[in-house]
Amino acid sequence: MIDEVSMKIRADELLRMALAEDVTSEDVSTNSVLKEYAFGEADLICKQDGVIAGLPVFARVFELLGEGAYTQFFAKDGDHVQKGQILARVSGDMRVILTGERTALNYLQRMSGIATYTAKMVKLLEGSGLQLVDTRKTTPNMRIFEKYAVRIGGGGNHRFNLSDAVLLKDNHIGAAGGVRQAVAMAKAYAPFTMKIEVEVETMEMVKEAVAAGADIIMLDNMTDAAMREAVGYIAGRALVEISGNVTAENAACLKDIGANVVSCGALTHSAPILDVSLKNLHPVEIDEDFSD
């Protein structure tokens, strides 16, 4: 599970990598117009309605670039924001603001887009008892930020990585020789504290997974009728997860299947960004008495 604390622990290294990608030696454009320190401020403005996520990440980019960079927030992660709303004001060395602008916005737009799409999906599933979770279909080196954004949008996190849980998918089952064999091998190898989940595509596989003692059974790309039959057969002997091409267009159809969890790769691989912009950068005279 990803929260703000765990994200902060891992974030700096990844943010530095993103900044290094954008600045290999210097910011030529900024250094052309600003030869020395100049204090200023700029406004972070929302250009679309949505759910904002990643404001601490946005601010941290500028902090890593320059001592004294400060962001004053007028919104917080999880807020429903509106077009034209001023979300924050960034102040500090204008060279830092200019150099960090695109990297900071890239994170904020991506994370807010995911939170917005997740909130839409949660609303569509409201009243069903289904828990909406993400998958590992994330952007390389962005997983911690994207899974955090899912939680901000009201969703939950599936396993974070391959070390978190046993999930026996079609190729694992093929390699093991069948569902029963794969589950038996996992029970023999994995720590007793770790649940075992099995991906199934047919009723025959459902029956094998139940007989083998799987803790969670994932119904992958099955028809509505087949899923209802599977849920009836499982009858509470395992948690039931629905997966496979789940989107905002078909999510509402899953409400009465009777499953426990629905996992959705689209939350992280297909959510459009939320458009935000850093505008109105201008120099600000520093009160010398205050600065002392």
Image (tube, rainbow, N blue to C red):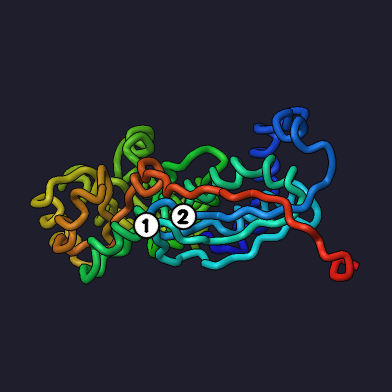
Q: Residue at x 59, y 40 (%)?
A: 102
Residue 257, position as x, y percentages in the image? 15, 60
Q: Residue at x 42, y 62 (%)?
A: 81
The answer to whether 3 appears left or right of 47 in the picture is right
| Residue at disc 1, secondary structure | loop
Q: Residues within 10 Å of mark 2 (few under 14, many from 20)?
A: many
Residue denoted by label 2: 46
Residue 255 location, quadrant: bottom left
Asked if disc 1 and disc 2 are in contact, CB closer than 8 Å, the reply is yes
The amino acid sitting under disc 1 is Asp
Q: Residue at x 64, y 56 (%)?
A: 59
The amino acid sitting under disc 2 is Cys
Whether residue 88 is visible:
yes
Looking at the image, the residue that sits furthest to the right is 292
Residue denoted by label 1: 49
Residues 190 and 58: in front is 58
| Residue at disc 2, secondary structure | strand
The answer to whether 195 appears left or right of 62 in the picture is left
Q: Relative to 35, is 279 above or below?
A: below
Residue 108, position as x, y percentages in the image? 52, 50
Q: Residue at x 70, y 57 (%)?
A: 91
Quadrant of the rendering where the C terminus is positioned: bottom right
Instruction: Measure the alpha-carbon separation of dots 1 and 2.
Output: 8 Å
Residue 30 location, quadrant: top right
Residues 157 and 20: in front is 20
The answer to whether 108 appears left or right of 11 in the picture is left
